[in-house]
Amino acid sequence: MSTPHTGTIGEIAENLGVSRQRVHQWKLAYPDFPPPLTDGRTGGHYDLDAVSAWATKKGLGNRAAVKP
C-alpha cells in the first residue's frame, strides 16, 4: 500500500483551481466530501488524489487532476 499524497485545504484549492472558501463550501454542501486523514489546529490534511477524484466525479473545480 502506498502512502497517500496529502495536503491542506489551501493545496486542494490550488490544485483544483478554486478558492479555499469554495473548498470549505463543498465540505459543508457534500456529505461525501473525502474526510481529512488527520485533524489539526490549522486544519486537516486530506488525500489529494481522493479529493481530486471526488471533484472530477462531481464535475467540480477548474482543473481535472492534482498536480504532481
Image (spheres, grey):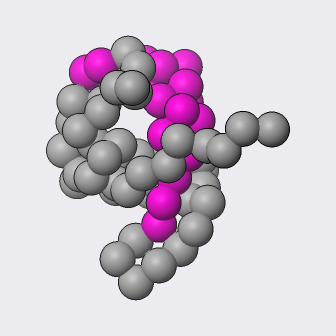
Front residue of 61/14: it is: 14
**Which quadrant of the figure has residue 47?**
top right
Horizontally, residue 20 falls left or right of residue 12, namely left
**Residue at horizontal 61 percent and vertical 60 percent from the top:** 37
Residue 64 in the magenta stretch? The answer is: no
Total numbered labels? 0
**Residue at horizontal 55 percent and vertical 25 percent from the top:** 53
Percent position of residue 2, x then y:
72, 38
Residue 3 visible within the image: yes
Horizontally, residue 41 falls left or right of residue 54, namely left
Q: Is residue 66 above or below residue 38?
A: above
**Residue at horizontal 30 percent and vertical 33 percent from the top:** 15
**Residue at horizontal 23 percent and vertical 38 percent from the top:** 14
Q: Residue furthest right?
A: 1
Residue 25 visible within the image: no
Percent position of residue 29, x then y:
45, 49
Q: Residue furthest front?
A: 2
Residue 59 in the magenta stretch? The answer is: yes
Percent position of residue 35, x then y:
60, 55
Q: Which residues are magenta?
A: 44-63
Percent position of residue 31, x then y:
59, 50
Front residue of 8/58: it is: 8
Q: Which part of the image, by quadrant, shows the C terminus? A: top left
Q: Residue furthest bottom?
A: 41
Q: Is residue 14 above or below residue 56?
A: below
Front residue of 30/64: it is: 64
